[in-house]
Image (spheres, rainbow, N blue to C red):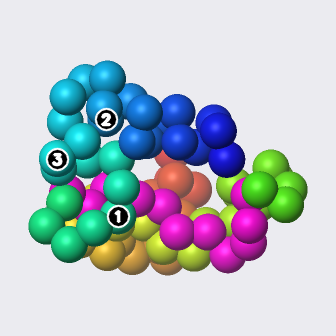
């Protein structure tokens, strides 16, 4: 949990952008990865992506995987 907070909220505070980044709240910029399992229970769960949101737009996981396979 500390690593996750360091990468999000703590970083946003240090960079003085916590008013728009670092937590999931109405009105904040939405760049996030949603997981299918708890990464606190097992760090390997960070590999179990359920959804990706960039700039408030939900990305199509199937298309992302297709693009990654084509590299």
Q: Residue at x 24, y 42 (%)?
A: 18
The image position of residue 14, as x and y in percent, is 31, 23
The image position of residue 41, as x and y in percent, is 84, 60
User: Of the residues under marks 1 and 3, which one precedes in the sequence?
Assistant: 3
Identify whether 22 is placed above or below 65: above
Mark 1 to mark 3: distance in Å? Answer: 11 Å
Residue occupied by mark 1: 24
Q: Residue furthest top?
A: 14
Q: Secondary structure at mark 2?
A: helix
Q: Residue at x 57, y 56 (%)?
A: 69
The 10 Å Cα crowd at callout 1, few under 14, some 14 to 19, many 20 or more, is few
The 10 Å Cα crowd at callout 2, few under 14, some 14 to 19, many 20 or more, is some
Picture quarter containing residue 42? bottom right
Q: Secondary structure at mark 3?
A: loop
Residue occupied by mark 3: 19
Q: Residue at x 35, y 64 (%)?
A: 24
Direction from residue 25 to residue 62 in the image, left or right: right
Q: Nearer the viewer, residue 19 or 62?
A: 19
Answer whether residue 30 is visible to the viewer in this image. Answer: yes
Q: Secondary structure at mark 1?
A: loop
Picture quarter containing residue 36? bottom right
Identify whether 31 is placed above or below 56: above
Direction from residue 23 to residue 25 in the image, left or right: left
Residue occupied by mark 2: 12
Q: Nearer the viewer, residue 64 or 2?
A: 2
The image position of residue 20, as x and y in percent, is 17, 49
The prevailing secondary structure element of the residues shown in magenta is loop
Check if residue 2 falls in the magenta segment: no
Mark 2 to mark 1: distance in Å? Answer: 12 Å
Picture quarter containing residue 55? bottom left
Direction from residue 42 to residue 20 in the image, left or right: left
What stretch of residues is rendered in magenta?
29-39
């Amino acid at each position: 949990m500390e690593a996750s907070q360091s990468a999000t909220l703590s970083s946003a505070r240090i960079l003085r952008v916590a008013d728009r980044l670092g937590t999931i709240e109405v009105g904040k910029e939405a760049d996030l990865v949603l997981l299918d399992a708890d990464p606190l229970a097992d760090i390997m769960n960070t590999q179990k992506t359920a959804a990706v949101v960039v700039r408030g737009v939900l990305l199509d996981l199937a298309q992302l995987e297709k693009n990654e396979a084509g590299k």
